[in-house]
Amino acid sequence: MDTAPTITAPMGTATISTAATNAAPTNAAPMIAAPMIAAPMDTAPMQEGRRERRPTARPVARILLCSMLAVALAAAAGCGDDSSSSSSTGSDDSLGTVTVTPEDAIQIRSLNAITGDVAYLGIPNQRGVELAVADFGPLHGFDVNLGAGLDEFCSSDGGQAAAQTIVADQDVVGVIGTSCSVAATAAAPLITNAGMTMIAPSNTSPLLTSDLAGNPGPNHSPGYYRTSNNGLYVGEAMALMVHDQLGLTSAAAIHDGDPYTQSIAQAFADSFARLGGSVTAFSAVNKEDTDMVPILTEVVAGNPEALFFPIFQPAGDFIADQAPRVPGLEDAVLLTDAALLIDGFMSLPQSEGIYISGPDTRFASEANESTGKTAAEILQAYQDIYGESPSGAYWAHAYDAATLLLEAIKAASEVVDGNLVIDRASIREHLNAVSGYQGTIGTISCDAFGDCGVQKITVIHHLDHTDLEAGRNNIVFEFAAGSS
């Protein structure tokens, strides 16, 4: 069996709901309808609405060198700067400034998985950012330029390549992304050590922030934030549902080895064991595997009552399809996470009967305090502009991530002699102090490690692959960290 570092979280509270909400069927829109645009990975094209770049920041080669050293040594030490803009990546020194002239626009970027198997997650994120930038409007009288959407392909290599493109543009001050935790582990060190700020809408791996006990995760980067939940709470919520509501005492977990799937599976296993349950197997598949019978046969040896597999498509599709046909797993309860809380999976026949955890998307009527838009209004605009509903669960988290970044830039900038001067370190200082910000997803506060999510999780029981809306509304368990 594979092993992973044990990670623990303070126990939250949970509420059980046994009544399903039977909503009227809705027609699921195609997963990808609008053409996506992605900047080339090896160039930094000039964006619309900007002049020729001025050599006011440190050389690109030096940015990349400092970033790579930071990844290898886990600290930025000794990377000098011979430009007029201070750019130390230490804790207290200035990260430098960016000056925007009246002819230019404030530069931010969106970095998500917008092509490939995980585009269902990244495309709604990208669109949520676009809507937020449009709704927020000019900042101190200066337009905000999002540029072309960059693709991280839900991979480490993709995250690194896209991050190198971003840091090559010295005028970029912030990034919304990534979609996938595995991409963030490679992108975040490069982006943050270049002095930029990064806010992720759908990363949940605790490795990127903290263990919730005051210790940074091994992949934590100062300057990285997220509006999604910490995965330790996700694992705890599912364990509580399985042990306390379903009354099961044995369970197995399968992951695919990446930071998201392995850490979520480990969080579930640790929480389930603390509750007194028996973890009969903790195994891994390859993302490219199609024949899951060998690993499922290994799992069945422990005779688990439940099987948790927080895995992306297409591997998750194969596990859901093949598990019930493996002798000994016919009656096992199947469980998964938000990676499969999507139209593409929930419309498959094998998705029926599966419990799926994810962020609580029962957004209240309160408006985002920066734009005045409610979730219902944003969703309607999404449908009107893009011709379909979001295929993933994190579009509102992306919207709030963008408005948080824009508010931080606004607070960290001032107009001097007609130019907008943005202080990079002050962007982070503003985010570090965020408390009680009213977002679309709820009330947002950021902790010392960049966790800004509302930490509310629901579990649905999906019963009918032809009625996705009913499945999403069939909430049978809910969890809120720290609630009484």
Image (cartoon, rainbow, N blue to C red):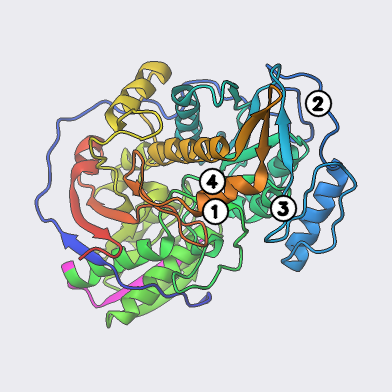
* Nearer to us: label 1 or label 4: 4
Determine if residue 296 is in view.
Answer: no
Would you name the residue on which mark 2 appears? Answer: 53
Q: Secondary structure at mark 4?
A: strand
* Nearer to us: label 4 or label 2: 2
Q: Secondary structure at mark 2?
A: loop
Judge whether 376 appears above or below 310 on screen: above
Task: Check disc 4 and give the amino acid type.
Answer: Ile
Q: Magenta span covers which residues? A: 245-256
| Quadrant placement of the C terminus | bottom left
Would you name the residue on which mark 1 appears? Answer: 181
Would you name the residue on which mark 3 appears? Answer: 193
Q: Residues within 10 Å of mark 3 (few under 14, many from 20)?
A: many
Q: Residues within 10 Å of mark 4 (few under 14, many from 20)?
A: many
Residue 444: percent from the left, percent from the top? 38, 49
Residue 323: percent from the left, percent from the top? 35, 60
Q: CA distance from mark 2 to mark 3?
A: 21 Å
* Lower position in the chain sequence, tag 4 or tag 2: 2
* Lower position in the chain sequence, tag 1 or tag 4: 1
Judge whether 387 appears above or below 273 on screen: above
Task: Check disc 1 and give the amino acid type.
Answer: Ser
Judge whether 368 appears above or below 80 on screen: above
